[in-house]
Image (cartoon, grey):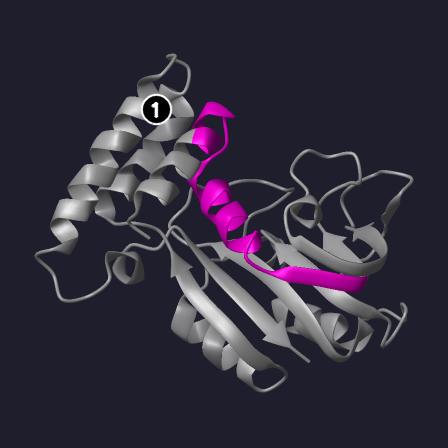
Amino acid sequence: MFSISIYFQVIKGIIQNKSLCRILQILECKKYLISGNVLEFGTTPDSNNRFSSIAKKKKIKNIEYGDKNIKHKKVINIDLNKKNNFRQNYYDTILFFNIMEHLSNFVNAKKEIKKIMKKNSIMIGSTPFLYRYHNAPSDYLRFTKPYLEIFFKKDFKILNIKNLGFGPFCLSYSFLSDFTKKIPFLNILLFTIAFILDLLLSFFVRYKLEDIYPIAIFFRLKK
C-alpha cells in the first residue's frame, strides 16, 4: 500500500472530505470490473458516493439500487434480514459496500444475496473493521478477514479477501480525522506524518501492518 501514487490518491480523497476508510475502499473498487445487471446496496442513483460510478464497466445492461432504509423512488426496498422472493438468479454483479455491519441477520442476508445472483456472477464489497460506530440506522458488527474467509467459503468461491490500511499511525489519523477536518489542511498534514511513520515502521516488522491494524476488509466473491 505504500507508494507515492497511493499517497497522492489518498490526499485527493482527503481534500474531497472523504474518510480514510472510504478512500481505501474506492481505490480498491477502481481495480475491478462490473458488468451485466448490477445491483448496488446502500446508496441512491443520484448519490456522489456510488461505488458503481467508480468501478470499471463492461457491457452494462442496467444498474439498480437496493436498501430497506433509504426512501427513494428509484431504490428497491429489500430487507436482507428477512426472506425475500425477489428476482432470483438475475444479477451479474452485486456491490455490497458498508452494509454487513448494519445487518442484524447477516447469515440470512448471505442466503438472500446468493439467491438473486446468477451462476458465475460476482459480488464486490467491503466492511469497516477498526472504524467508528456509525448509525445507518444501526451499527451492529465488525468482521475479521479470517472470519469472512470461513463465512463466505461454503457459498461462494473466494476471489479475494484483503485488509485495507497502512498501520497504527494512519489508523489513529482515521479516528481523529472527523474532528481535525474542521481546520483547513490539517488532515493533509496529519495524514502525511502518519503515512511516513507507518512507512518507517514497516521496515522494522516482519508482518504487513495493515493485517494487524486494518481499517476495513475488502472482498470479491464468485457464485
Q: Quadrant of residue 57?
A: bottom right
User: Which residue is depicted at the point 26% across and 60% down?
Assistant: 212
User: Which residue is depicted at the point 42% across and 65% down?
Assistant: 162
Q: Which residues are magenta?
A: 12-36
Residue 184 showing in the rendered view? yes
Residue 105 showing in the rendered view? no
Query: Relative to 137, is 134 on the left or the right?
Result: left
Query: Relative to 181, is 169 on the left or the right?
Result: left
Q: Nearer the viewer, residue 181 or 77?
A: 181
Kindly identify which residue carries mark 1: 187
Q: Quadrant of residue 171?
A: top left
- Residue 181: % across, % down: 40, 20
Q: Nearer the viewer, residue 127 or 198?
A: 198
Residue 13 painted magenta: yes
Residue 14 painted magenta: yes
In what element is the residue under mark 1? helix
Mark 1: give few (<14), some (14-19) or many (20+) Cα within 10 Å: many
- Residue 217: % across, % down: 45, 60
Quadrant assignment for the C terminus: bottom right
With respect to residue 16, does 8 lie above or below?
A: below
Amino acid type shown at disc 1:
Asn
